[in-house]
Amino acid sequence: MVLFLAGIFLLFAGGITSLLVRDQIKPFISVVFSFFSTLLLSFMSLRILFGGETLTYSFGLPFPVGTVPVVIDPLSAFFILLISVMSFIPLVYSTGYIASYKDKSLSSHYFFLMLLICSMTLVTAVQNAVFFLIVWEIMSLSSFFLVIFEDDKKEVLSAGMNYLIMMHISVLFIMAGFIALAMHSGSADFSSFTGVFAKNGILKDLIFICLFAGFGIKSGFVPFHNWLPKAHPAAPSHVSSIMSGVMIKTGIYGVLRMISLMGTPTLAVSYFVLGISVLSALYGVLYAIAQHDIKKLLAYHSIENIGIIGMGMGIGMLGLVYGHALLTVLGFAGALLHVLNHSIFKELLFLGAGSVYLKTKTRGIEKLGGLFKKMPCTGWLFLIGAFAIVGLPPLNGFISEFLIYLGLLKGLELMNINILVIFILSFGSLAFVGSMALLCFTKVFGAVFLGLPRSKEARHVENDSPFIMTVSMSALAVLVFSIGLFPQYAVRLTFTAVQSLTGRTENISGTLPIDLMNIISSIALAFIALAGILLVIRKLSLKNSYQESIKTWDCGYQAPDSRMQYSASSYAAPFLSLFNPFFAVSSDTVKPAGYFPSAGRFKEKKRDIIEYYFIRRLTGYFDGLFKKFSWIQGGDTQLYILYGVIFLIAALIAVVVY
């Protein structure tokens, strides 16, 4: 526990120190403090994950918090390891990225960045409902100030306010669930909630769904996702990578923590989690294909991958319901491993997108192109992240999705007609999600890095990303390959955390598919070796041969132009046209007229259907409602004093009566 407290102290001290030093050294100071904190927290987490021990500590606070238990069990340790390592790498990247904001003050940026990492770490360790809500709120507020870093832009402030409102709706749901649990258990400690969850009945399901909604808003499950595609593009790229790769996983932690307290969930709740997860995965990837902003596209892919993680949780919950040990282990192991894998490849993609933005000052996919020749390192690293996110072997995304696929197949052994139908549909949905993700990233990589530049922003790029940014992305690429080539060690990393979720005290290592992971590792290494040998043979055979490059036949037109190549929109249009009913579609068309038309235009916009038809109308209703009470805030000081007097009189009457 000393290591944990020291790690937290270093993060907080780093934030305070960054307020006191010059802007030029704030990034360096934050990296130094974060480095030592990461070492301490990682060492502690690995010791717990491989040793299976649980650390406990408690401290007292005034009413209404009381005694706060700090418990670091294997589930907490897994997320602490994730938070510390995967927050440190973008922090290193930021030292190169933030240098481009020469006109912006960094007086509070690194303070809130360190505070965010500190609060995320505390969220996974405190097990008192009141203090949990306090650090949860600190996490939301610190990330809000990071989102609005470019506060001189109207769209950034709008995205920040949307994010802040959604986070407070999240808190309301979590608070309601905790209040219900505390009222029935008589305590705010998590350990007392197990007795409430142990009682069968509708109350158990309602409390869990309420908490799932609160944590689901933070994670980005559909239909609680609308903040995510707005906040990620608005934030600086290193902040976007931490929010997508790490922060939204605190919502997953919250759900998993409640599952660990529930013991055996009900069948209805398990189907609910699996169903909403399948919907999130399909919805996220479909809307990702329709995006023209590279960071917004990646944000929708976060929704997709949160759905895949949720599918693993749903499978694990159904395994608990039916007492199927292998199904439970495969589901939860797949979910936890995908939490880690998504953090790695999504951070790599966001940092790659940040490098592109740094050089071009645009996120518009249609304005890019031809960057691979000028930014080869960024191009290769982005391609590795793209291969990983679509689940191609031998990279890390394949491993966690393989465990979830395997769980769906093993679930068919239950010989239950409901499970049979649900799992076959889930299996098909996951496969369809993978194929759509492949379509999306061939579109992105082709439009951004290949072909000819489509704008002056892309044409004027002269060199690749700064060295420190390339090093940060390379570290993530190494992790992508490490887990893909040696999955047996990554699966073992989840072992004790899965054991804490299943509630089993006996050794469950026999149910983990370690032998299968060893086989996958051998095949992946053999594939890499064979590919390397073939490349060497090809290079040697062509060393002294004559090679000639010939242009593709272009109908005699010798001056190729960017308008002759596929755009991102035209590439995806045939597929997206099949799903038009799932979008709120608007178009702007000017048809060419006459024998010699001077101009023509067609522009189509696909909006989020939940945002457009539900959230937009709901916010419009509340806006109109609140405007009816605008007379209350009339700017009259005497009137405000009268309000205060009325409130005091009402409070005195209430005290006398009760």
Image: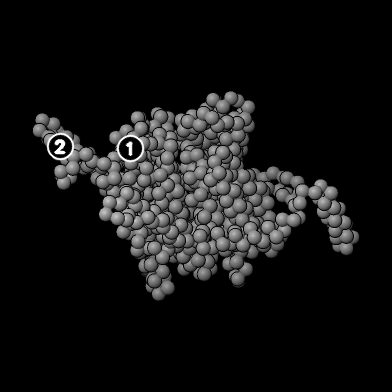
- In the image, residue 514 sits, relative to residue 89, either above or below, namely below
Residue 599 visible (yes or no): yes
Which one is nearer the viewer's eye here, 388 or 301?
301
Residue 557: percent from left, percent from top? 18, 42
Most extreme residue toward the left is 545
Q: Which residue is mark 2?
A: 549
User: Splitting the image into 4 quarters, where does residue 526 fall?
Assistant: top left
Nearer-N-terminus badge (2/1):
1
Q: Residue at x 45, y 48 (%)?
A: 296
In the image, what residue type sits under mark 2? Answer: Ser
Residue 492: percent from left, percent from top? 42, 48
Which one is nearer the viewer's eye here, 631 or 47?
631
In the image, what residue type sits under mark 1? Answer: Leu
Q: Quadrant of the C terminus?
A: bottom right
Q: Is residue 4 left or right of residue 603?
A: right
Kind of element beneath mark 1? loop
Marks 2 and 1: CB-CB under 8 Å?
no
Q: Which residue is mark 1?
A: 371
User: Splitting the image into 4 quarters, where does residue 105 fall?
Assistant: top right
Residue 65: percent from left, percent from top? 72, 49
